[in-house]
Image (tube, rainbow, N blue to C red):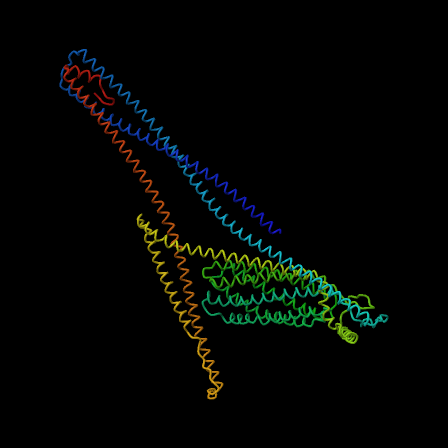
Amino acid sequence: MSSTEDLTSKYQRLGQEYQKARAQITVLKKGVVDEQTSNKVLQDALKQKDQTTRKYEQDIDSLQFRNSQLSKRVEILQNELDDYERKGTKPSKSNPQTSSISFIHQQELQLKIAENESLHKQLQEAQTDNQNTVNHLEARLEVLERNKDSYEKQIEDCNSKNAAIIERMKEEQIMLNAKVHKLEEDLKFAHIMSDKYQQQLKEAHQELRSKLDKTTKLMQEKVPFIDTENTMLNKLNIPVCDRNHQHTAQNFIESTCNQTIVLMAGLSDYHTYLEQRLKVYSLDIMHEKASASNTKFSSYLLQNATYSRKVQHSLTELLDQAKQEVFISLSTLPSYGSFVSDLKSYVKYLEKLLPYRVLSVNEECQSSMWSENLEKTNNNLLKEEKKIVSLFTRLVNYLSIISNLNLQESSFTKCVENIANILNVLCGCFHAIYELYVIKSKEEHNLPTYTDRLKTTDDCLLTTVHSLSSTATKLKSVFQQNIQFMTGFHGFKRKGLPSDDSQILTKPLKIFFTQAASYMQSISQESAPSSVPYSLAVRNSRSLIASSDNNDTLKEQAATTQEALIRLEQDKEHWMLEAQLVKAKFEKERKKTALLGEELKKCKTEALQIAIEENLSTINDIPDKTRNATRSTSSTTSSIQQDNASIHQVPLGTMEVFSKEKSGYMAESDHENLVKEHLTNRIAQLTKQLQITDSKCINFYHEAHSLYKQIVLADKNKQKLTNEIVDSNKRVETLQDELETTKRSYEEQLRTLTDHLCGMNEKLTSQKDEIDELKTGGGGSAKGSTLGGKFQLPGRKK
């Protein structure tokens, strides 16, 4: 129920996050819409300002045109005045009318000059203001466009995140529904199993009570009174077994034996990987056959399994004896001596390997590619391996000393303490070897000539050394936890004697124990043949005691098995759902590939219209490749189909069954030879067909993989082309807008120029009329003197 509550709480949190994300998306959409409206308003304002600036520019152009015309006209008038002066007409008395006319003209000219100056100033101010406003608006437009891009990116990110969250939530919802359904089924199953186990427990309690009652009755009725007055004879009484002590001893032996078996397996793996590394190193880096010392070393390394398996076999025998024995001691476990002897032979094997290991490491260090750091690491590795061999020899010596039965308490405790210290040092050595191998692998992998096979062997060596260090630490912890139990001597209790730790189970006591069991068996057979015999009760005492003492262990085992079943079912449903998802993804990918083929054709037509010549070559190459690949795949599929047809068409073989009449003419050996030849030929044909089909399947797989890669490349090129098409469309739109704006501006300028030319023509005609009137108005000399004296352009000399 707690798991379902956690799932519902997680689902509620995901829903809340989804609602928050949706609210953020709405706010962001509103912000984007507002920004778009503000951008549109600013763009309209910009257009209006551009129109005003263009009008001002047109006015400036018209004014400049007028100024140029006026300056030309003034120059013409000045030249005419100079001509009049050259004629040398003496100034006559000016009439009052001509002087007044010239004065009026002069005032008009001064007014026009002042107006021109003021207009120039206004134009300059308008230009500066217009430029400032344009710059300000452009800067603001850039800022707004940046904000717009950022908002659009944020919206896209939010949409993608929300889509991913929605898909994830849907998948999680499906998974959660499946888990809920599964948990409900598991709950029903658990209730059923709990009821079943409770019934079994009740039945076991009832059986054990009935057996206990029977044994107590048998002991009270049939076992005679034991006289305990004579202390000398009391030593021959059958000892009472301390079950707690025996259980702890059995657990200790089981844990140590299991850990040592794992350690021996790890050492054998280490030696095999070393042999593989020697071969690969000589072939890949040295490019020559291995030396004589290395070949011997590899042959010795291959023999590691024989020695390690002997040790493992002796350990399994010791464990089995410890489980079967009621009184556990060194005297009752004869397989301990065989274990020590096998371990001694394994240590001798390690000592035999050491010199060859030194030679192989020296050969590696002599190569030119190896650096000083690698040499140091190799030397350190050799030191640690020598330490390990010496520690194994010391350990074997102490174990052989312990196997001696005539051992005092002080010497036994010293041996146990020394073994614990050896295990501690051995754990440190394995850890140091692991660290050195890590450093060595890092430095060697950086070498340019280092191959992949050597890298894989190095990784295998690292994993084995790591497992060795972990098993050594576990063995050390087990041994240190049970040092007090091992150093403390536990004797056997007998009737009529106090509990003495120095008492040891000897051979005669063991014989008496078996005789008592046989006596109880004979009594049970004489009195009640239908009851259980005492020997069988003695045999089954372990199971009875274990069942009475280990109800909790049974419950724990049932719980662990139930949990394992639940986990396995959960894993099964999980993988089933993942398989369904993978199938759905596979169908989607198939649809995508079909759509990609159609979209590629469309992209080709669009690209030809837009005339993007650089990408046309890549697009034309990709479909050609896909066609060739499809042709090759179709050819391979057709060939596979033909081969399959041929395989199906091949008959299963015909065997002639001879009748009794024909079999008389043929010997049995000939008949067997025919059958044998027929079967061998048929097997050879089938193996050939299998090899052909395997090779064709591999070829088809590689071609499919290449097709997939080509489809991925085509998709990438398609995306590039779509992006380029979008960019080109944008550029075309911008160019069209610029064309329209330039057309409008030129049309407006032409209109203003035509209006201006019409006005200037009118002004020229009026000025010509005025000049003609002035010429016809007599007194040319007086007019010339007044105009020459008073009328003067700025920056022009008389």
Residues 49 and 540: in front is 540
**Residue farthest to the right?**
229
State the image quarter where residue 38 is shown: top left
Q: Name the residue at 38% across, 67% down.
A: 639
Q: Nearer the viewer, residue 330 or 246?
A: 246
241 with respect to 467 (left or right): right
Residue that sits furthest to the bottom in the current view: 665
The picture places residue 434, in percent across and down from the top left corner, at: 57, 60
Residue visible at 32% across and 53% down?
617
170 above or below 566?
above
In the rendered image, residue 541, in percent from the top left (x then y), is placed at 73, 68
Q: Which residue is drawn at 39% across and 65% down?
A: 637
Locate the C terminus and report the quarter of the image it occupies: top left
Where residue 388 sits: x, y (%)?
61, 64
Residue displayed at 29% across by 36% down: 742
Asked if residue 128 lies left or right of residue 546, the reply is left
Q: 335 or 168: which is nearer to us?
A: 168
Q: Is residue 683 left or right of residue 517?
A: left
Vertical order, 777 against 690 (above or below): above
Left or right: 410 with respect to 48? right
